[in-house]
Amino acid sequence: MASSDTTGDAAGRRLFPEDDMDIDPSSKALLRCMGCAKVHIASTDPEESEGNIDKPKRCVKCLSVVYCGRECQRKDWVDGGHRKRCKTIAQLKDKLSANAEELRNLSLPSLNDNFWEMSETREYCHRRFALFDAIFSEATSRAWSSGGTPSITLTNRLALELALEHAVDLLTLNSSDDMRIRCFVPSILIGLGKDHEAYGVIKYLLTNGDDIIEDKRGEHAHNLVCLVREKNEQDVSEPLEALDLREDSDVGIVFDLALIKFCIYHNTRNMQTLNRGEIPNPDISTAVAGFFDLSKDWMNIDSSNLFLQTKQLLSCVHHLNKYILPNLMDPHRMLRVNPEGYAKGSCNEAVLVIQRSAVWWKVNDFTHGFLRSFISGMDSQLVPFPLKQEERQMNLATIRGNFFERMNPRRAVELLGLDDDDDEEEEEEDY
């Protein structure tokens, strides 16, 4: 925090965020109507969009969805399932605002970034986490519920941007990250198409492991926020030996890393093929490669090695947790489970990993097809990669037996006493 006063300007921006948090400028060209999937070029900023007839309309209740107009809003309200999610988000926002007002009126000691240290502020962290997850669910639920062809058009980028803002705020307020919000950050960045930023965060987390919550926690939180905020040129094609993959590595982080490696492999291989044939002009092919966010030396990357790394990482995932890959063939039953905690290597851990990360494998045809092929022939597809077994913080037996408590935000309705009556007569809000 820039100030130890919880009501100061810097702290206040995080404790009492405006409903319309600043959205990354890149999202202005990707504001997708969740009723018809039309992409609006206009910004949600009224000053920038004044007089623009194509300006998207934002849901006034949850502020996490945009529509072309009433017809699209009504369609998503019913068919897209936004009705219930909107209500949950709105109720969580109301409770969080009331909680924040209580904190504003309290005379609290200097907390800096230790919002987990007092019962008054811990409750605020729980509620903020529940709101974060409700918005993250809004971003991904349509893709999960779709029974047809997987499509990126079913994901809500605006909600992802808002979820990332909440995640960064929580890391700043609670640098010890007792709720493990850091594990969500790579998944959100992947959903936003920021693979290099996601890789930077993953590399940092793998290098520091769970030491991040024990020592120099303020420094770790600051470094993570910088990796999220700043555009960085990471060498995604570097060998796995450059990463600190261990027996105690977070399996969800390894799963996200496998997806990044495969996407870079897919885009690199396609660009190299085009460069040899349909786009022989190096200037044109370099411009197209920039569109796919490939590194400047993409022509020299060994794409086959990236493919091998993807298989090695998925093999590591299966080694660290044997329940994740088999359940991806039919993940929907895992989406209905709400574990309150998990042990390393357990089915509950698999549930949480699938809920936060598996959707990005589904939304693109090429990733979805590859993953299904890998799992269906897994006995012959596994390519073991040696994980480091040196003790870092806990020995392996302790790691496997350790039970990580975690408030499951998907139980927000029950735990926070929200009104969850299913009143069919309720009408959608005007935008």
Image: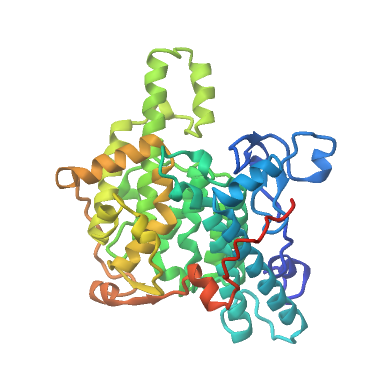
Which residue sits at x=71%, y=52%? Answer: 22
Image-quadrant location for residue 31? top right
In this orientation, which residue lies closer to the viewer: 353 or 235?
353
Residue 199 seen anywhere in this rendered image of the structure: no
Q: Name the quarter where the N terminus is drawn.
A: bottom right
| Residue 6 coordinates in the image, percent (x, y) | 72, 76
Going by the picture, which residue comes out furthest to the front? 425
In this orientation, which residue lies closer to the viewer: 124 or 238?
124
| Residue 169 coordinates in the image, percent (x, y) | 62, 64
Q: From the viewer's perspective, tell me whether residue 65 is left or right of residue 101.
A: left
Image-quadrant location for residue 301? top left
| Residue 26 coordinates in the image, percent (x, y) | 64, 40
Which residue sits at x=34%, y=66%? Answer: 349
Residue 277 seen anywhere in this rendered image of the structure: yes
Going by the picture, which residue comes out furthest to the left? 380
Which residue sits at x=52%, y=17%? Answer: 284
Q: From the viewer's perspective, tell me whether residue 173 is left or right of residue 98.
A: left
Q: From what the image shows, is residue 416 above or below residue 364? A: below
Q: From what the image shows, is residue 47 above or below residue 166? A: above
Which residue sits at x=80%, y=40%? Answer: 48
In this orientation, which residue lies closer to the viewer: 331 or 347?
331
Q: From the viewer's perspective, tell me whether residue 377 is left or right of residue 144.
A: left
Q: From what the image shows, is residue 78 above or below residue 153? A: below
